[in-house]
């Protein structure tokens, strides 16, 4: 696997993890809202049975100045359990994707180090700074050559245009 391929694999795995995390986080927040509604419903049920000067089944207080109000919509325990299972499965999947992305990051780093080492050996260099300078010089030389070629191509295209114009006047 080349370094470029490894970089691409890591980028894709990271994107998959980030997408998975966003989906998990939305579902987790939804579950938390459902759970709160469920517990609010439970409190509402208990509150409907409170009698002044009788102990609260939760805290034992004889006074009930602000009993819970039964919410309009309360999920049932089965719905809550089902949503919890979905969230747990999404979390597990998200963690696996995170771990895979982390593994690829390590492999990418190893591959990068290997490529640098081989480049230094091929260029007969002893340290990274020399490698970077040599690569920068090589890139600059390559860019300069490309500019020269581009200028020659432009010049040749102008000559071809001139020859076409001359050819138009010939019998």
Image: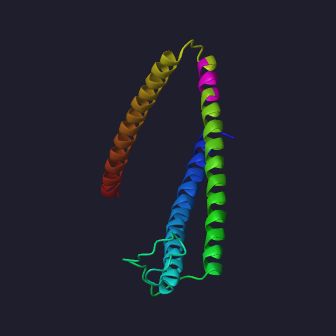
Judged from this view, the residue extending furthest toward the top is 126
Q: Could you say which is closer to the camera, residue 122 or residue 35?
A: 35
Residue 89, located in which quarter of the rendered image? Answer: bottom right
When the figure is inspected, residue 16 is found, relative to residue 75, above or below; the finding is above
Identify the image's colour scheme: rainbow, by chain, secondary structure or one colour. rainbow
| Quarter of the rendering occupied by the C terminus | bottom left
The dominant secondary structure in magenta is helix
Residue 115: image location, x then y, percent: 62, 28
Q: Is residue 72 left or right of residue 97?
A: left
- Where on the picture, by quarter, is residue 24? bottom right
* Residue lying at 45% horizontally and 30% vertically, measured from the top left: 142
**Residue found at x 49% / y 67%:** 29
Q: In the rendered image of this protein, does residue 142 appear above or below residue 5?
A: above
Toward the right, the furthest residue is 1
Tell which of 142 and 40 is nearer to you.
40
Residue 74 placed where, x, y %?
52, 83
Task: Tell me the quarter of the image containing the N terminus.
Answer: top right
Residue drawn 65% across the image and 59% down it: 93
Number of numbered discs on residues: 0
- The residue nearer to you, when weighing 12 against 59, is 59
- Up the image or down, 137 lies above or below 69; here it is above
Residue 20 lies within the magenta run:
no
Q: Nearer the viewer, residue 110 or 121?
A: 110
Is residue 12 left or right of 171 when viewed as pictured? right
- Where 38 sits versus 115, above or below? below
Q: Position of residue 31 (x, y in %)?
A: 54, 70
Determine the residue positioned at 63% across, 53% down.
Answer: 95
Q: Single out the residue that lies furthest toward the front.
A: 53
Q: Which residues are magenta?
A: 114-120
- Residue 92, image x, y percentages: 66, 58
């Amino acid at each position: 696997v080349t370094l470029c391929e490894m970089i691409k694999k890591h980028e894709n795995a990271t994107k998959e993890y980030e997408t998975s995390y966003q989906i998990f986080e939305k579902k987790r927040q939804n579950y938390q809202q459902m759970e709160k509604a469920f517990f609010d419903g439970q409190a509402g049920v208990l509150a409907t049975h409170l009698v002044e000067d009788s102990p609260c089944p939760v805290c034992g207080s004889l006074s009930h100045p602000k009993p819970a109000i039964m919410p309009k919509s309360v999920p049932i325990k089965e719905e809550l359990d089902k949503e919890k299972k979905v969230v747990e499965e999404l979390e597990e999947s998200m963690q696996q994707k995170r771990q895979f992305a982390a593994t690829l990051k390590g492999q990418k780093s190893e591959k990068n180090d290997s490529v640098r080492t081989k480049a230094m050996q091929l260029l007969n260099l002893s340290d990274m700074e020399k490698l970077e300078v040599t690569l920068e010089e090589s890139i600059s030389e390559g860019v300069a050559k490309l500019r020269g070629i581009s200028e020659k191509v432009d010049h040749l295209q102008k000559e071809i245009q001139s020859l076409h114009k001359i050819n138009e006047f010939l019998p």
